[in-house]
């Protein structure tokens, strides 16, 4: 555990000790920051985010400047590999922190609605966070991932049918499916399965998701390999 206050953060942030502080904080199980200003709360988010993105580079550990092209490359990889930073606040002094984090959650309390109005998600009590993350968050990721893959799969498969038919008709431009059937393909013929999949499908029961938080987001259903395997490889083979 690590405990640090606002005056100490004033000495650490913006100096060469900042990266050492981020490395130390990353190894701690929990950190308590007390008497910190709103700008310091946002700065902590920025420091920890930079550490997660650029800690793979040796120049970061040596306090050397990282080129802009390398920064862009690491930020692209970070979106795929590493985690996200979530901030929770209930007052106006937490607004900067909520806006700096990848996901901001505002708690509607006695300190007003400033945190709720500037957050991505709003909850009434802190205990609702468990269900928001482990149930709604996991189900949203799982369903959206399968919705995206299914949409790409059926449309690529449909387009490849026309492409393969051109080898049979000598690339004359003749269509294997009439225009009316092609028009209602997405609207009527294939809309119900994807709607049911994105609305009702779930990896496990809600009670199981709450009881076993270690299974949170272990599927990686929308990773690069799973996406291209479903969208391109399967559609090429099945069409």
Image: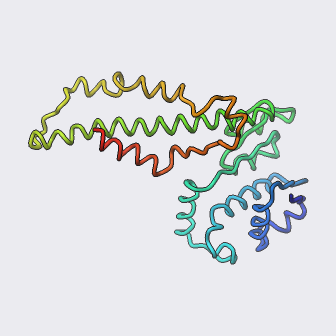
- The residue positioned 80% from the left and 56% from the top of the image is 29
Whether residue 109 sits left or right of residue 42 in the image: it is: right
- The residue positioned 65% from the left and 67% from the top of the image is 55
Q: In the rendered view, would you say 122 is above or below 20?
A: above
- Where residue 209 sits in the image (x, y, percent)? 67, 34
Q: In the rendered view, would you say 68 is above or below 184?
A: below
- Where residue 182 sits in the image (x, y, percent)? 26, 28
Which of the two residues, 143 or 101, is positioned nearer the viewer here? 143
| Quadrant including the N terminus | bottom right
- Where residue 220 sits in the image (x, y, percent)? 55, 46
Which of the two residues, 146 or 98, is positioned nearer the viewer here? 146
Residue 58, quarter of the rendered image: bottom right
| Quadrant including the C terminus | top left
Residue 218, quarter of the rendered image: top right
- Where residue 21 sits in the image (x, y, percent)? 79, 67
- The residue positioned 14% from the left and 44% from the top of the image is 167
Whether residue 45 sits left or right of residue 140 in the image: it is: right
């Amino acid at each position: 555990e690590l405990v640090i206050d606002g005056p100490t953060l004033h000495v650490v942030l913006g100096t060469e000790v900042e990266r050492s502080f981020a490395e130390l904080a990353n190894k701690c199980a929990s950190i308590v920051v007390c008497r910190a200003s709103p700008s310091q709360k946002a700065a902590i988010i920025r420091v920890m985010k930079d550490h997660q993105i650029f800690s793979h580079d040796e120049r970061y550990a040596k306090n050397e400047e990282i080129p802009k092209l390398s920064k862009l490359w690491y930020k692209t990889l970070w979106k795929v590999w590493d985690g996200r930073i979530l901030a929770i606040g209930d007052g106006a002094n937490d607004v900067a922190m909520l806006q700096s984090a990848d996901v901001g959650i505002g708690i509607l309390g006695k300190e007003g609605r400033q945190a709720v109005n500037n957050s991505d998600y709003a909850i009434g009590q802190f205990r609702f966070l468990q269900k928001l993350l482990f149930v709604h968050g996991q189900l949203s990721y799982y369903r959206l991932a399968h919705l995206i893959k299914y949409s790409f799969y059926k449309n690529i498969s449909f387009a490849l049918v026309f492409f393969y038919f051109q080898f049979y008709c000598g690339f004359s431009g003749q269509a294997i499916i009439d225009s009316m059937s092609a028009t209602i393909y997405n609207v009527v013929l294939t809309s119900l399965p994807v709607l049911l999949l994105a609305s009702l499908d779930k990896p496990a029961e809600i009670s199981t998701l709450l009881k076993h938080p270690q299974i949170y987001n272990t599927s990686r259903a929308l990773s690069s390999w799973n996406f291209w395997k479903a969208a391109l490889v399967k559609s090429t083979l099945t069409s």
